[in-house]
C-alpha cells in the first residue's frame, strides 16, 4: 500500500514537474532556417552533410523536434530515408533515421534479386560545444559541434559477400557552421571519421587494410535569397573500402521554409558510382515537419 | 519584477532630473554618461546603407513599425510594459541612424544597462528580429542590405539576453 502511494506520489510529482517544464519551455524561438534542415543521416544540416546546428526551432530556453521523409530517385536505384530528431535547449541533438536503399530492377542484375533493399538504422547524437551560428557575427569562431552516428545495417550476409567487415559501425564527426549575415551566406564544414561504405548501407570496412577509420570531409555553402529560401551546394568525400569505385557525393540544393513547421528541400544529387553502376544522378526531395 | 517596480517607483518619485532629458513626452531618467560607444556597433562607412534605408525618414518608419509590431505581439509585449515607449522609439531611431552612418549620435544607455532586469530570452530577441525583418520588408529594403544591418545587431544578443 505504501509502495503504491509512493509510486502514485512520485508519478504525480513527475507529471507536475513535466507540466511546469512544458510551461517554461518556449517552442519555435529560433529564426527561420537557422536550425538547418534534416540530412540523410537524420542530423540537422544540409542534405548530404551534417552541420553544427542543433535541429529544430528550440532556443536555449526550449526544445524542437522534427520528422522528415527523404527520397532520392536515381537511374538504377531509389534511396529513401525517414526519421525523427529533437533539439534540446539548442545544445544537444538526438535523432533516429531509417534508410532504405532499393535496388529495384538493378537487384536482379547484381544477382540480389529484383527489388532487393538494403536497410540501415542510424541513431545520432550531437552536442554543440562553442560559438553561435547566428549571433557571433563579430567573432571569427563558428558554431562547433561534435557528433556520433551509430549505424546498423540489416543485410549482413550480402555485405559480407561484398567484402564488408561489419554490419554495424559508428561515425564520429566534428562540424563547424556559420551564417555570414553580412554576406547572406551559410557555410559549414565537417570532418568525419568513418568506416562506412555508402554511408553504411553497404556495411563497414573492407578487405585487408581497408578496415580502418578514415577521415572524410563534408562541405556546404549556401546563399540566403530570402528569410525562407536558401540555395547552395554540398560536397562529401567517402572512403572506397570495398573496391567498388565508391565516389564522392555532390549536390545543388534549394531549401524552402514554408514556416517554422514545414520545410522542403529539393536537390540535384550526384552520387556517382554505386555498386558498380555508374552515373547515379537524380532528384533529391525532402520534406520536414516539426516545431 | 520587484526590482523593476522599485525602480519604477523611484523614477516616478524622487529621482534627480537629468538635465539632458529635455525630450517632450519622456519620463525623466537618472543621469548617465552618454557615448556613441553605447550603440554597441561600429557604424557603416559611406552613405550606401543610409540610402538603402531611405534616409532618416526610412529609419524612423522602420523603428515605428518594429515597435508597433512588438507591442502587439503576445510573445514579447509584456517586456515593454512599464517602459517609456516615447524614449524607446527615440533612442532606437538614434541607434539605427548612428549605425547606418546617418549622422546621428546615440544618447541612450549601453546595451547591458538598457536591457537589465527585463528577463529577455533568446526567443524574445529573435521575435524582435522577426518584427524588424517585416518592418524592413515593408520599407522595401533589399534583403541583402537587411542582413548587413542585422549582422551589426546580432552580437547585441550577448548583452540583451540574460544568462
Image (cartoon, coloured by chain):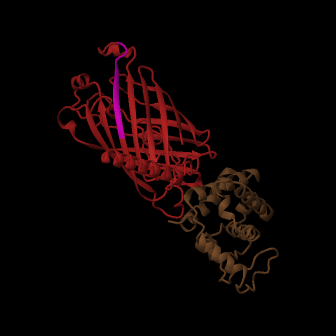
Chain colours: A red, B brown
Say left or right for B7 vs B138: left
Closest to the observer, A182 or B6:
B6
The x and y percentages for residue B53 are 74, 59
- Asked whether residue A261 appears in the rendered view, the answer is yes
Residue located 65% across and 83% down the image: B33
Residue located 38% across and 49% down the image: A10
Q: Eyeballing the image, is B148 above or below A215?
A: below
Say left or right for B68 vs B112: right
The x and y percentages for residue A206 are 22, 32
Residue sitting at the far right: B24
Q: Tally the numbered discs.
A: 0
The x and y percentages for residue B10 are 67, 81
The magenta stretch spans which residues? A114-123
Residue located 52% across and 52% down the image: A25
Say left or right for A234 vs B19: left
- Asked whether residue A193 appears in the rendered view, the answer is no
Question: In which quadrant is the C terminus of chain A drawn?
Answer: top right
Amino acid at each position: 500500500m505504501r509502495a503504491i502511494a509512493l509510486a502514485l506520489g512520485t508519478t504525480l510529482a513527475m507529471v507536475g514537474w513535466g507540466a511546469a517544464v512544458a510551461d517554461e519551455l518556449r517552442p519555435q524561438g529560433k529564426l527561420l532556417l537557422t536550425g538547418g534542415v534534416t540530412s540523410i543521416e537524420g542530423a540537422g544540416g544540409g542534405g548530404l552533410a551534417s552541420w553544427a546546428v542543433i535541429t529544430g526551432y528550440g532556443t536555449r530556453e526550449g526544445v524542437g523536434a522534427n520528422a522528415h521523409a527523404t527520397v532520392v530517385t536515381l537511374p538504377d536505384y531509389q534511396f529513401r530515408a525517414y526519421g525523427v530528431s529533437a533539439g534540446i535547449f539548442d545544445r544537444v541533438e538526438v535523432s533516429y533515421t531509417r534508410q532504405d536503399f532499393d535496388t529495384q530492377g538493378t537487384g536482379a542484375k547484381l544477382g540480389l534479386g529484383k527489388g532487393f533493399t538494403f536497410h540501415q538504422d542510424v541513431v545520432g547524437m550531437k552536442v554543440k560545444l562553442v560559438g553561435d551560428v547566428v549571433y557571433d557575427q563579430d567573432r571569427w569562431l563558428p558554431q562547433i559541434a561534435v557528433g556520433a552516428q551509430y549505424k546498423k545495417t540489416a543485410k549482413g550476409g550480402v555485405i559480407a559477400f561484398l567484402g564488408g567487415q561489419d554490419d554495424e559501425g559508428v561515425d564520429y564527426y566534428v562540424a563547424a557552421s556559420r551564417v555570414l549575415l553580412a554576406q547572406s551566406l551559410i557555410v559549414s564544414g565537417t570532418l568525419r571519421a568513418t568506416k562506412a561504405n555508402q554511408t553504411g548501407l553497404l556495411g563497414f570496412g573492407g578487405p585487408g587494410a581497408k578496415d580502418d577509420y578514415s577521415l572524410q570531409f563534408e562541405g556546404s555553402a549556401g546563399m540566403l535569397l530570402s528569410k525562407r529560401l536558401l540555395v547552395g551546394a554540398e560536397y562529401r568525400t567517402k572512403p572506397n573500402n570495398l573496391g567498388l569505385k565508391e565516389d564522392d557525393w555532390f549536390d545543388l540544393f534549394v531549401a524552402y521554409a514554408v514556416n517554422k513547421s514545414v520545410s522542403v528541400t529539393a536537390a540535384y544529387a550526384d552520387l556517382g558510382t554505386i555498386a558498380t553502376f555508374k552515373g547515379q544522378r537524380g532528384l533529391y526531395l525532402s520534406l520536414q515537419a516539426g516545431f | 519584477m520587484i526590482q523593476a517596480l522599485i525602480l519604477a517607483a523611484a523614477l516616478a518619485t524622487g529621482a534627480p532630473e537629468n538635465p539632458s532629458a529635455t525630450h517632450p513626452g519622456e519620463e525623466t531618467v537618472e543621469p548617465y554618461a552618454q557615448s556613441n560607444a553605447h550603440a554597441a556597433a561600429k557604424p557603416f562607412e559611406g552613405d550606401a546603407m543610409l540610402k538603402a534605408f531611405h534616409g532618416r525618414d526610412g529609419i524612423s518608419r522602420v523603428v515605428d513599425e518594429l515597435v508597433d509590431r512588438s507591442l502587439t505581439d503576445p510573445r514579447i509585449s509584456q517586456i515593454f510594459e512599464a517602459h517609456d515607449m516615447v524614449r524607446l522609439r527615440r533612442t532606437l531611431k538614434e541607434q539605427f541612424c548612428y549605425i547606418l552612418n546617418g549622422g546621428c549620435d546615440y544618447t541612450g544607455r549601453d546595451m547591458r544597462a538598457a536591457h537589465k532586469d527585463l528577463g529577455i530570452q533568446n526567443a524574445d530577441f529573435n521575435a524582435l528580429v522577426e518584427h524588424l525583418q517585416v518592418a524592413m520588408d515593408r520599407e522595401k529594403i533589399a534583403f541583402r542590405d537587411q542582413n548587413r544591418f542585422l549582422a551589426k545587431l546580432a552580437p547585441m544578443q550577448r548583452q540583451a539576453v540574460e544568462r
